[in-house]
Image (spheres, grey):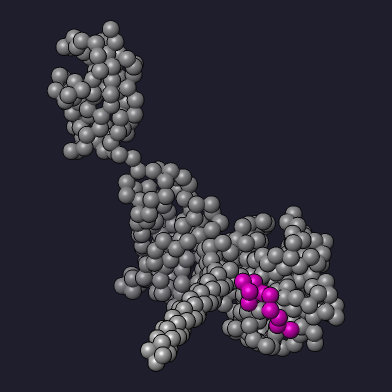
Amino acid sequence: MKNKRNTRLGNRTRLSTRLIWVVGTFSAVLLITAGWLVYLNFHNLSKTRASGEGESQGGAVLNNGEIITEFTWEKDSPLEATLGPDAISASEDAHTFRGGRASTQGLAAGSNGNDINLELPGTELFDVEGIDVSIDYRGTEPEGSFLSRGNHFNFGISDGYLSIQYRVDNRKGGFTSVKEKTTYELPKDENFRTYRFIYSPTTGRGEIFVNGMPVWSKGGLANTVMYWKGAGNLYVGRGMNGGGKDMAILDNLVIRTTGTISPLAESLLNFSLEGKENGVNVHWLTAVNDQVAYFTVERSINGLDFSKVGTINVNPKAGELGEYNYLDKTPIGETVAYYRIRQTFKNGKFVSHSLAAIRTKASRDFSIERVSPVPFNDNFEVSYFMPNSGRVWLQLTDPKGKILSTETFEAPQGKNIHSFRDKNNLPPGNYVLHMIYDNKKVSANITKSM
């Protein structure tokens, strides 16, 4: 009886041990899964913010100027900025609320139908020569403003379409106005999208992007600044109440600078591009070398989205006038490539100069392009490509590799045609044509007719 009790006790002990092990393993799996989901959530957040960390949102390829202010609305107060100056007021119903982009918090208007009206102090920080405004928005409101500053600036929605209004200096003591309702109609699906306006004073160009894709642009005079110094406070969410729904409709506001023009905008001289066998040589001359910290070479394949390909530190021994070269060896195929130089000055300001374009050619190797006629009778022509000038050996062999005919000749760089004459009266059948250049052999199967 005692032995049976001990046996039952041992079985219970083993069962309890197994149960503890199973529960512990299951708990560990849950913890690992939860941790992974949290990581994915924050990873996704970093790639979907309007600040452009991810390429899908436009990214820093559009503009990576200095951030003036940034709001992510992750704190309890809607007035608290993540970077830069805080807001000074907002509607009493405006508040941060869950349901922002990528499962974060965002800015909601509340359920009482009042507009958000987040007010930013119009200090000298905003009296910049160009501006980059990026914000995540969802909603179905036909009218409203993402960001406005009196009568001088308004980026938002008009009659359901993206709209923009801004002023630029006319160099006569006044201004020229740009006011347009674009052809981009905002979708009515309440999904977050990134809406972005950029005005560059160096090019005089205004552009609007949705999720990084251009939807509107307006050209202007190069080296023209915005006309809005001392224009007062700025407002976010004027005319926006979320349709009376208490949900996050705005998220991730980022306002950046876009460079300066005066007095250094015309400092880049003799900016030129030259195609080389191993890349594109970018050459430029600067007239204010002693005021520059470094240069950034940027490249684009569409003339809009630029990415950095290299950085050149200034040569302090060059004095006021400096000459520079940068060889871009990145293969980009046979297309038109656009380049521009960005100068960053010792005072922290920068200017992006007008772009230049060059048609690049894809690098090609030694190759046989065509043999004709097929089959041949007494002679044939072989078309081939030479990457450089040099001596070529031509061999004709049988299928087993026995050499039946050999020729050698000089050929220039590029496409060439060589005529082969059957001096040995080869019998009809299949043969192999070999061409050898610079220790590389290329081959083609050929046939002689009856």
Above or below for 60 versus 437: below
Q: Is residue 171 left or right of residue 448?
A: right
Q: At which x and y percent is residue 438?
A: 19, 38
Is residue 166 rendered to the left or right of residue 332?
right
- The N terminus: image quadrant: bottom left
Residue 417 lies left or right of residue 66; in this view the side is left
Q: Give the x, y percent position of residue 135.
A: 66, 71
Residue sticking out furthest to the right: 112
Residue 328: percent from left, percent from top: 37, 56
Q: Which portion, as a residue range, is magenta? A: 95-104
Total number of numbered labels? 0
Position above or below: 188 against 428: below
Q: Is residue 141 visible?
A: yes
The image quadrant where one finds the C terminus is top left
Residue 260 in view in this figure: no
Residue drawn at x 47%, y 81% is 19
> Within the magenta stretch, is there residue 25?
no
- Residue 418 versus residue 406: which sits nearer the camera? 406
The residue depicted at 36 percent of the width and 62 percent of the height is 324
| Residue nearest the viewer, comparing 263 with 445 | 445
Image-quadrant location for residue 70:
bottom right
- For the point 47% across and 66% down, the residue is 342
- x then y, percent, for residue 387: 29, 38
Query: What's the residue at 63%, 83% (across, down)?
Result: 74
Say if 272 sits above or below 262 in the image. Answer: above
- Viewer-nearest residue: 426 or 286: 426
